[in-house]
Amino acid sequence: MSLKSERRGIHVDQSELLCKKGCGYYGNPAWQGFCSKCWREEYHKARQKQIQEDWELAERLQREEEEAFASSQNSQGAQSLTFSKFEEKKTNEKTRKVTTVKKFFSASSRVGSKKAEIQEAKAPSPSINRQTSIETDRVSKEFIEFLKTFHKTGQEIYKQTKMFLEAMHYKREQSIEEQSECTQDFYQSVAERMQIRGKVPSEKVEKIMDQIEKYIMTRLYKYVFCPETTDDEKKDLAIQKRIRALHWVTPQMLCVPVNEEIPEVSDMVVKAITDIIEMDSKRVPRDKLACITRCSKHIFNAIKITKNEPASADDFLPTLIYIVLKGNPPRLQSNIQYITRFCNPSRLMTGEDGYYFTNLCCAVAFIEKLDAQSLNLSQEDFDRYMSGQTSPRKQESESWSPDACLGVKQMYKNLDLLSQLNERQERIMNEAKKLEKDLIDWTDGIAKEVQDIVEKYPLEIKPAAQPLAAIDSENVENDKLPPPLQPQVYAG
C-alpha cells in the first residue's frame, strides 16, 4: 500500500486499503496487500508448489540411487553371493529412506490434516488439565453457559473446540505461521459446518465464532503471542525507538485537523491514546480490535468538534499517526501480528473493525518510512530534529504575532530559557569533566615524582640505640636495703 504525502497533508487512496486481488475485502500489509481469504489461497498455492518440488527432488534422488546401484551390480557381477546380499540390503535401506522422504513431503501427510488432529486429540494433554487462571476459568464457564442455549449444536461445537485445543498442544514446536494456519482452518471449518449442516443463521454464527475465538485464544495466548521463534520482539523495540526519535513531530507537520486547546478535543485525544495503549492488556484478538475501534471513534469525534463537520478519511489517517506517535503503544508490532494471525478473518476483511485495523497498519508503515518529504521539511532540518540538535518549537516561537496569547508567549519564553540553561549545564559538565581529568593527571604526576625520588634516594632505617640503664640497676643488694624513712609528725 503506497502512502502519498502532499502539501495539504497525508493522503491514502481508499482503494489502496482494499485487497489488491480485487475481491472487495480489506487488505493487510502483513498479507502483502491481500485479504485473509486471498492470502490463504496464495499461501496454499505456494505451499503446494513447494511440496511438488520436494516430491520431484525425492523422485530424482531415488532414480539416481537406482542407477548407481544398477551400474555397481554390472561392474561387480563376479563378486561373492554374500557381498551381493549385502549390497541388496543396503539398496533396500536407501529405497526405504527415500520413500519415507516422499511420504513426508506428500500432501496426504500434511500436519494440519483433520485425521492427524483427531489422532493427536485422543492423547490427554497436560496443558488442558492444568490449573487454569481465574480469567481462563471464568471464560470457560461463560463459554459452556453460552453453548447450552444451542443444545445439540452447542455440544458438537464444544467437542470440536476441545479437540482443537488438544491438537494445538502438540503443535507448539511448529512455526507460528503453521499454528496460525491451523487456527484459521478451524475457524473456517466450524463456520461452514454450522451454516451447512446445522442450518444456523449467519447472525448467530458470528456470535458463536466470537465466543469460540474468546475461549480458545484465552487459553493459547501465552503460547502464541510474541513467541520466541519470531522476530516480533525485535520489531517492537525498533518501532518504539523510531517513535521516541520522532517525539518532535507536531500536529502542524502532519496537517492534523485537531485543536487540543479545546477542552473536549483534548479529552478525546487522551481517551484515544488510552485506548490504543490498553490494547496490549487484552488477550483476545477481538478485544484488541475493539480498543482500536474505540480509539478511532474518539479521533473522529475530536475532528468533528474541531471542524464542526463530519471527519473525512483524509483527516483520520494523519490524526491516527499523531496519536500513535504521542502514545507510543507497547508491543505494537506484536499486537498487530497477533491480530493478523489469530483473529476471526471475517472481522479483518469487512466492517469497521477491519477498516480501522487496516488504517492502523498503514499508520505504522508510514511511521517506519517517515522522512523529510513526508513532513514537508528540508533534509537538513529533518536531520537536525532527529539528532536532537534543535527543536521545531523553538523556531516557531520567533514567528508569533503580537496578538498571540500571552500564556503561549510566556510558555515559549520559558522553553527558550530552559534551552539556554541546558546549554550552560552542558558547558559546566564539560568543564567539570576537564577539571576532573586535570586533577587525575596531577595526582598521577605527583605520585610518579615521589616514586622516582624514593627509588633514587631509598630510605635507610638504622637500628635503635640501647636504652641507658639506671645507676644502681646492677646492684643485687637492693632487695636487702631497709625501707626509706617516712616523716613523722608529733603533737606539741
Image (tube, rainbow, N blue to C red):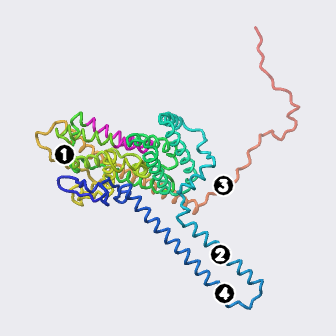
Amino acid type shown at disc 1: Ser
Q: Which residue carries the number 3 mark?
A: 461
What residue do we see at 40% from left, 46% from top? 330
Whole-angstrom CA distance, mark 1 to mark 4, is: 89 Å
Amino acid type shown at disc 2: Lys
Choose the circle earlier in sequence order: 2 or 4.
4
Choose the circle earlier in sequence order: 3 or 4.
4
Q: Which residue carries the number 4 mark?
A: 72
Magenta region: 266-292
Is 367 colored magenta in this rendering? no
What residue do we see at 59% from left, 45% from top? 127
Q: Which disc is residue 397 wearing?
A: 1
Residue 143 image offset from top left, x and y in percent: 49, 37
Q: Mark 1, mark 2: which one is toward the viewer?
A: 2
Amino acid type shown at disc 4: Ser
Q: Mark 1, mark 4: which one is toward the viewer?
A: 4
Amino acid type shown at disc 3: Ile
Q: Quadrant of the N terminus?
A: bottom left
Are discs 1 and 2 less than 8 Å apart at CB?
no
- Quarter of the image for residue 411 reads top left
Q: Is residue 42 visible?
A: yes
Mark 1, Cα crowd under 10 Å, few <14 / some 14-19 / many 20+, is: some
Instruction: Give left or right: position of 50 versus 487.
Output: left
Choose the circle earlier in sequence order: 1 or 2.
2
